[in-house]
Image: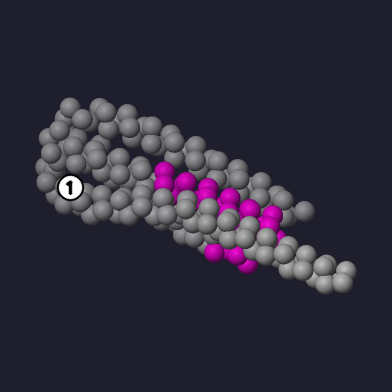
Amino acid sequence: MVAATVGFGGIAGVARADQAMDQLASDANKSIMVAEVAVDQARIAIENGKQLVAVIPADSPLMSEVKQMLMAAAENWSIAVDSLSGAKESASKISTASNIEVAKDYKLLAQVNSRVALSGAKVVQTSLLFVDAVAGNKGEALDIIRMAMQDSLAATSQVQFNYERVKALILGKYSN
């Protein structure tokens, strides 16, 4: 009878561990879904931006700023796409992790990667708002968008810094 009780306790423990892994994967996937929406919105902004750039006269006094915004958009688009991919890769490893602690680390990596993707996508959207304002001769909005862009870039920098710290801490746990 004692052996049967221990056996069932082991099964219950495995079931609880599976539930915990499922919850970790669910939490990671929620972060990924938010980032996916932002990346999709950035993709749409890029498509619209391609048409808007053609409307801006080549000799516009704002063309150099438009180019800077487009460069920031391109750089952050790449970061957003790569980070979203990294988030998905980390989340996919949660269910096959060797133990709950490793699964928690994969969840954390998925979440911080998702946040990097989200912040990069927001920079893309903000930079293309600037292009839209220039193309639509909405000069009154430019200063507000410039400030929003500075804020977006600062936030993205902080999120990337946090990601690097988290990644280093996790790597440090397993390199000993």
Q: Which residue is mark 1?
A: 53
**Identity of the residue furthest to the right in this view:** 2
Which residue corresponds to the image point at 66% horizontal and 50% vertical from the top-left? 170
The residue tagged with tag 1: helix, strand or loop? helix
Residue 162 sits above or below residue 77 on the image: above
Residue placed at 11% from the left, 42% from the top? Answer: 57
Position of the N terminus by quadrant: bottom right
96 and 169: which is toward the camera: 96
How crowded pointer 1 is (Cα within 10 Å; few <14, some 14-19, many 20+) is rated as some
Q: Is residue 136 left or right of residue 131?
A: left
Quadrant in which residue 56 is drawn: top left
Q: Position of residue 91 (x, y in %)?
A: 54, 60
Instruction: Tell me if residue 6 comes above or below residue 76 in the rendering.
Output: below
Asked whether 39 or 101 is in front, the reply is: 101
Please state if 94 lies on the left or on the right of 11 as rendered.
Answer: left
Q: What's the magenta region?
A: 92-119
Residue in view at x 24 percent, y 40 percent: 129
Inspect this view and state whether residue 86 appears.
no
Residue 35 location in percent, x, y? 41, 51
